[in-house]
Image (tube, rainbow, N blue to C red):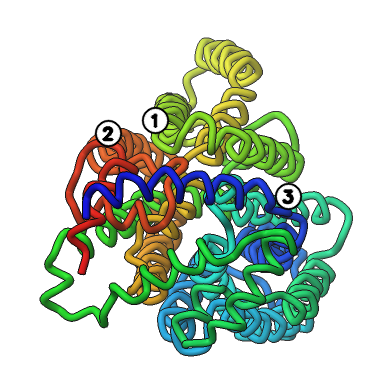
Amino acid sequence: MSTDMKEETPLLKRRLTSSESQINNSKLFLAVFSAVIGNFSFGYSMVFSSPVLPKLKSPSADPGLRMNTEQAAWFGSIYALGAAAGGLGAMLLNDLIGRKLSIMMSAVPSAIGYMLMGGAMNLWMLQVGRFLTGVAGGMTAASIPVYISEVSHKGVRGALGSCPQITSVSGSLALYALSLVVPWRYLAVIGGVPPVLMVVLLVFMPSSPRRLLSLGREEKAKIALRWLRGSNYDTSIELRAIQHSIDTQTTVTLSQLGTPVFYRPILIAVVMRFLQQMTGITPILMYLESIFAESKVSLPAQYDAAIVGAIRLLSVIVAASLMDKAGRKALLYTSSMLMFLSTLTLTMISHTTPCPPGPNPLNLTMGSDHSLNDSIGNALEASQHGSASIIPLISTMVFIFGYAMGWGPITWLLMSEVLPLVARGVASGLCVTVSWLTAFVLTHSFTHLVDRYGLYVPYLCFTVVCVICLLFNAVCIPETRSRSLEEIENYFRTGRTFTIRRSHSTAQPPVQ
């Protein structure tokens, strides 16, 4: 038996290499593009509150739509609550109707939500519309990475796994740029266009071959895989590997969830999504203009937000180009360090910022000497502000750059890679739900923390979380670069600490 396998393994590798050389990725890229338009809409809708809230809180706002601090906190954070609900819905829809249809279904709450916000006459329309766009965001966040991982092959899965983050960042940048010239109601109208385009394109795209095989539709799976890989691709080897993976899986039971092959990857994915949110990325993006206004940055806040959006897009593109070269762990280390240094700088700046700003804290009549001291103090303070006003912008840019290089795209990618194949649909929905519940609590409390303590306390918490991210990457996260989904699953099954490829080959014979 072992002799036969030794002779067969080089042959299979040669056949697989020959088959992979015949791959044409053009239609695969089209399928991925059609899906990730949903992430464009997700990124657009997530930061919708950043340019809109300052207008709705201003004295010149429509009296029926003007918001106080508590209402603004709900408008910013209710999106995350909707995304958590969308993640729960995706847990059911991913396995009930499939990944492709789940993505298409997200267009319904998205379109309704933008219609409500664009035509809002009172606050409840704004809040409900914001919640519905969050539901759509949660559905796409849970479904699109799984769809991409299942239609891609390992040669490009790392780069394509970054596409959801790239398009999400592009959507955010588009909103920041449009907000410079477009009234906020028209921003909502424009937001309804990408979901419609996504549905139109996805109608012509294939379902996941893995999904089709799991339903017993072998011929449709073969057609879908050949469409994705090109007409010259030999689908038999890949289809057999997928079918073997499906055949060796059973329905997950509670007792099985206690085994390492299930609980280890699920815990890793859930904790990564929790830590990703605890870095503070969501409240920073949702309140970016307000944060820059609070930080006294010299440039207008809306232009600062657009600059940060451009830096965020650049960093995600850099991460995508390095994903399959530098590896996941190296980028996560770099990401954690950059975020730590930037949040530490922001913590120190916000701690040393004179508080309260504006009028003198004491209003005592002390004579001309006191007036002279005030003048000197104000001059020194103005000088300090002039030299330091750009530091919050630079530090925020470094934070966004670091996040978008690692903990942004890689968390999404690893979620789709390490989750057990048999429980991937439900587990991905669980990850998204945990992530957005965390984001809701953090985003809602952020506004009140800033009102009470300034930016110092939130930034200090984010700094501590970045250190935890660094340690978690060192201890718990495996390197999945150039590994197939089956090899990654086998890594957790065997508990090996060395290369997954070696684990796969040594663990293959005992599999029943």
Secondary element at image label 2: helix
- The residue carrying mark 1 is 333
Identify which amino acid the numbered label 2 is placed on.
Answer: Ala
In contact (CB < 8 Å): disc 1 and disc 2: yes
Q: Which of marks 2 and 3 is in front?
A: 2
**In the image, 273: left or right of 69?**
left
In the rendered picture of this protein, how many numbered marks are placed on residues? 3
Inter-mark Cα distance, 2 to 3:
32 Å
**In the image, 180: left or right of 475?**
right
**In the image, 491: left or right of 47?**
left
Secondary element at image label 1: helix
Q: Quadrant of the N terminus?
A: bottom left
Residue 181 at what x, y percent from top left? 88, 54
In contact (CB < 8 Å): disc 2 and disc 3: no
**Residue visible at 66% across and 76% down in the picture:** 223
Secondary element at image label 3: helix
Residue 197 at what x, y percent from top left? 80, 74
- The residue carrying mark 3 is 173
Identify which amino acid the numbered label 3 is placed on.
Answer: Leu
Q: In which quarter of the image is the C terminus?
A: bottom left
Residue 450 at what x, y percent from top left? 44, 48
Identify which amino acid the numbered label 1 is placed on.
Answer: Tyr
